Amino acid sequence: MRTRLLPLLVATLGGVALPPAAAQNVALYDHWNGLTGFLYQNYSFDQGLLNGVKTSAQWAVPVVVVAPLGRGMSLDLTTNYAHSTVSLYSGQSQSLSGFTDTQLRWLYTLGRDRAVTSLSVNLPTGVHFPASDLSVSGSVGSNFLSYPVTNYGTGFGVTGGAAYAARAGSWNLGLAGSLRYLATYKPFSDSANQAFKYTPGMEGRIRGGADRLIGQGGHLVLGLTYSTFSTDTYAGSVSFTGGWYDPGSRFIGELGYAHLLGKNTLTFAAWDYYRLASGASVNAPPKENIFDSELRFGWRATTKLQLEPLVGFRQWSPADYRGGRLYTVGANARYAFAERFSGQMTARYGPGWVYDPTFGRADLHSTTLYLLLRYQY
């Protein structure tokens, strides 16, 4: 069995690695692919949140193009157009619309699906916004709420790394690493804050993964990612003073298990995000933990249609106060319109709550609708 860990590692990190002994290069993506669709996510809150937030919503249109570049190489492009809105119980609302940054990623496979090098470039095509819209940007950037688009725009950046996977008995083992650089940029568009400049620190990331078959029809996947950052700095403006920010190291653990039941599949997936306490010249965030789990049952209704009902649970736990909890029920539907054209629709709904240390608990309800279309040539 050839390992399939490498695409997962590459999707997370990219790569730069040494090739294995004599083997023919085979690209991870050897066909043209195009993906687009419509993503919608909405949260409605009962009264009780700081600033009186009533709803926070976002819709986005992703654009992904993957192009093969001969033997062993491919180039992909990713961007989004997004519209985000925050409405208050007072009747006021704020919105933010525009394109996000564009990511270009070059992949080169060394050997037959075992090692990959990559170089990713972040092009600053994203919209910059006035400081008065900072509450909208902060809302969609929440790790707990997990919107499709969490950041509209930064600066020019370059990321390189390495990914390698190999067999070890009945296990497939993989290791990947990356280093990212982002240039200084101006996040605000209003004239009063044009002097404000943000200089992100370097980010280093390493990821390990393992998978194996278990019994008759079982497949186990494990992953662990560690990220570390150097200190960010920022220069002041009319509304903001200068200072520094240490994002804090992050750990992400992942577990997945799938079991075949005839023509159907039962899948359990979970991840845990743990961030150490941040440091900052003003208002340093405490450490936090987010746990997410999901159980899905894949039912092949026809040769072209697969239905996948699901249930999910998410827990947000900041260090110094109760954070939040979210329960979801929903379903995925995958349909093959033709040999090269397919679509996926996702619908989810669920109750939950968040806790504000000043104003207490506020119940919430979430609604998620995704429609994705993929064409391969």
Image: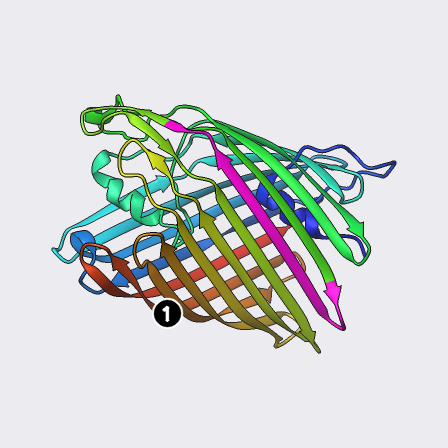
Which SS type dominates the magenta stretch?
strand
Is residue 377 shown to the viewer in this render? no
Is residue 90 shown to the viewer in this render? yes
Residue 40 vs residue 217: left or right?
left
Q: Where residue 301 appears, x then y in whole percent?
A: 61, 77
Q: Where residue 146 appears, x then y in whole percent?
A: 40, 53
On whether residue 237 falls in the magenta region, the answer is no
Q: Nearer the viewer, residue 307 or 305?
A: 307
Q: Which residue is most to the front?
A: 320
- Amino acid type assigned to the residue bearing label 1 in the image: Gly
Q: Which residue is mark 1?
A: 350
Please tell me whether residue 179 is drawn above or below residue 342 in the rendered image: above
Q: Quadrant of the N terminus?
A: bottom right
Residue 184 vs residue 334: left or right?
left
Question: Measuring 20% from the left and 38% from the top, which residue is drawn there?
Answer: 132
Please tell me whether residue 321 is drawn above or below residue 109 in the rendered image: below
Quarter-of-image position of residue 217? bottom right
Question: Measuring 44% from the left and 67% from the top, which residue is drawn there?
Answer: 313
Part of the protein shown in magenta: 213-232
Q: Nearer the viewer, residue 184 or 301?
A: 184
Question: Measuring 86% from the left and 36% from the top, which residue is drawn there?
Answer: 21
- Rendering colour mode: rainbow
Q: Where residue 349 appears, x then y in whole percent?
A: 38, 69
Quarter-of-image position of residue 200? top left
Residue 131 vs residue 111: left or right?
left
Question: Measuring 18% from the left and 61% from the top, which residue is drawn there?
Answer: 48
Q: Which residue is most to the right?
A: 22
Please tell me whether residue 58 is drawn above or below residue 120 in the rendered image: below
- Element type where label 1 sits in the image: strand
Q: Where residue 212 appears, x then y in whole percent?
A: 73, 60
Q: Nearer the viewer, residue 33 or 212?
A: 212
